Image (cartoon, helix red, strand yellow):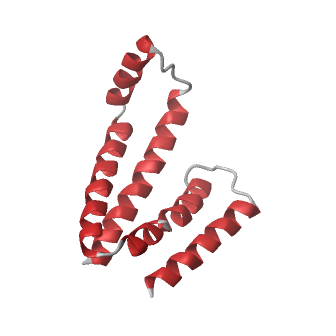
Amino acid sequence: MKWLLLLLVVGPTIASDLLQSYEMKRSGVQSVGARGLASLVQMILSRKFLVLAILCMAISFFAFMALLQRAPLSFAVPASAATIVFETLLARFLLNEAVGFRRLTGAALVSIGVLLIAK
């Protein structure tokens, strides 16, 4: 059960972060002043991928809370760091972001840590 919950944390987190990045790059720079906040909320609600990203974040949040009921924090947090590995690769291949050697090395080190925690 803890592995299913971990999957429900990692998958929606990855989806949420990718959807947010994609939509925010499309929307350009937004103002966050008093008037800008209202237009930012309106812009978020008008973009289906941002609304979907918020839904994914909610799924991830509640799955993480359930995971903490079944697994120790010392497992849940490091194991959920698997998002870093997948997001780095997907940012490169889906979003066409520049991912250098240092970032790839960091992601590889994180994946080694996740594997060590998973045992």
Q: Residue furthest bottom?
A: 119
Give the quarter of the figure containing the C terminus.
bottom left
Q: Outermost residue, top direction? A: 35
User: Looking at the rendering, which quadrant does residue 106 occupy?
Assistant: bottom right
| Quarter of the image that includes the N terminus | bottom left
Instruction: Tell me residue 118's x, y (percent).
Output: 44, 82
**Above or below, 64 relative to 71:** above
User: Which residue sits furthest right?
Assistant: 101
Q: Residue at x 44, y 72 (%)?
A: 79
- 118, above or below 94, in the image: below
Image coordinates for residue 46, horizontal then vertical, percent = 33, 27
Which of the 4 image quarters holds residue 20?
A: top left
Residue 10 lies, in percent from the top left, at 40, 64
Q: Is residue 56 left or right of residue 35?
A: left
> Which of 50 and 37 lies nearest the eye of the viewer?
37
Q: Residue at x 36, y 57 (%)?
A: 12
Q: Residue at x 75, y 63 (%)?
A: 101
Q: Position of residue 8 (x, y in %)?
A: 31, 65
**Count of marks overlaid on the render:** 0
Q: Which residue is at a point 51% across and 42% down the rendered structure image?
A: 21
Vertical comparison of 88 with 55: above or below: below
